[in-house]
Structure formats: C-alpha cells, structure tokens
Amino acid sequence: MLKMFTTQLIGLLKGIQEREDLAMEDAARLLSQALIGEGYVYLYGAGEMNAITSEALYGKERLPKFLSLFDQDKMVDLNSTDRVLLLTRSSADKNVLAYAKEVALKQIPIVVISSIDEHDRELVDLADVHLDLNLTTSLVPTETGERVGYPASLAGLYVYFCLYLLINDFLEEYE
C-alpha cells in the first residue's frame, strides 16, 4: 500500500508541475509584485491547508512580507499594493469563496490553490490565478473498494514550494 501511495503521489505532483507550470509562473509574478513594491501577501489556508499557511509564515524558508489574512478572527485591512493567497481543498469551499468575494470587492489580486469542483467554479472564476491540485479522490484503493490517502496538504505544500522558488528567482532578478 505504501509503494502504491508513493507512486500515485509522485504522479500527482508531476501532473501538477506539467499542467500548472505557466500558471505557477503567473502566480509567482503576481505575488512578487507586492513583495517588490510596498504591499504584502496575505494568506489563508482552510482546514488542513492551514499547513501551507504555517509553512509560509513560520517555516525555515519563509518569504518576506507574507502575513496572515486574519488578525484576531478579523480580516486585515488590505490596500491596492497587497495580494492574497487562498488555499483550500476544493473550489466548492463556501467560507473561502466568501473571503475571496470580500477581497475581490476591494480589487485586490487573488491567487487560489485548490482542486476544482466542476459543479462549483465560482472561486476559480474569481481568482486572478488559480492553481489546480487536480485531486478529486483519495489515491490508494483498499481491499473493500474504498480509497484512502487524500494528500491535499502535501500537494498544496508542493505548489507553495514551487511558488517560493519562482518568487525567489523574481526577487533576485529585481535586485
């Protein structure tokens, strides 16, 4: 089972890299604008995707000017130089959609990382750049026919580190 999970996970990550390569560059460029200018990148991770927010805010290799979108359960004040990065398991997440709508009303650019729910694309359409995790089901079939091993946070961390590397390249070019 472990070998199958690892094989499926590697395939998932390779697929993300191949499909989302250009979108990741667009997202990194968009987020870099805030870092090069006077803005900040504000993050919110829903549920298990908070692991990516924790990595970005407290990890060994964090980027400057990355902050939490919420301060004491209240959305921070945003301005036109800021950018927002929203992370959720599925584009059908109603709470994240509500946050995205609030941010979009302020005309702040948004990057979203999630899997796309084909029945609910409003969050995808609202994002300036959407990065699709393409994770629709757990990876490993069991003997009973069920599937287990849904690595949304692992896939999200992979995308975050891809963005991190691209943003670092953009910041180095700018200096």
Image (cartoon, rainbow, N blue to C red):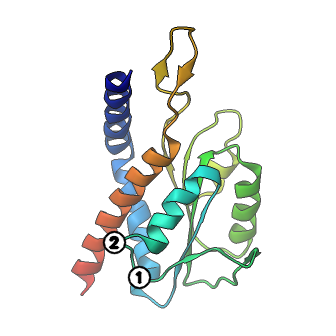
Residue occupying the point 56% across, 53% down:
49
Image quarter where the C terminus lies is: bottom left
* Residue 25 visible in rendering: no
Amino acid carrying mark 2 in the image: Glu
Residue occupying the point 69% across, 68% down:
104
Which of the pair 55/107 is nearer the observer?
55
Left or right: 28, with 142 as reference point: left
Q: Is residue 31 above or below residue 36?
A: above
Residue 81 x %, y %: 54, 84
Find residue 64 and name its label: 1
| Secondary structure found at label 2 | loop
Q: Is residue 1 above or below residue 65?
A: above
Find residue 106 and name its label: none
Which of the pair 14/175 is nearer the observer?
14
Q: Name the residue furthest top.
A: 144
Residue occupying the point 74% across, 79% down:
72
Left or right: 133, with 168 as reference point: right
Residue 143 x %, y %: 51, 8
| Secondary structure found at label 1 | loop
Which of the pair 73/160 is nearer the observer?
73
Q: Which residue is mark 2?
A: 61
Residue 167 x %, y %: 33, 70
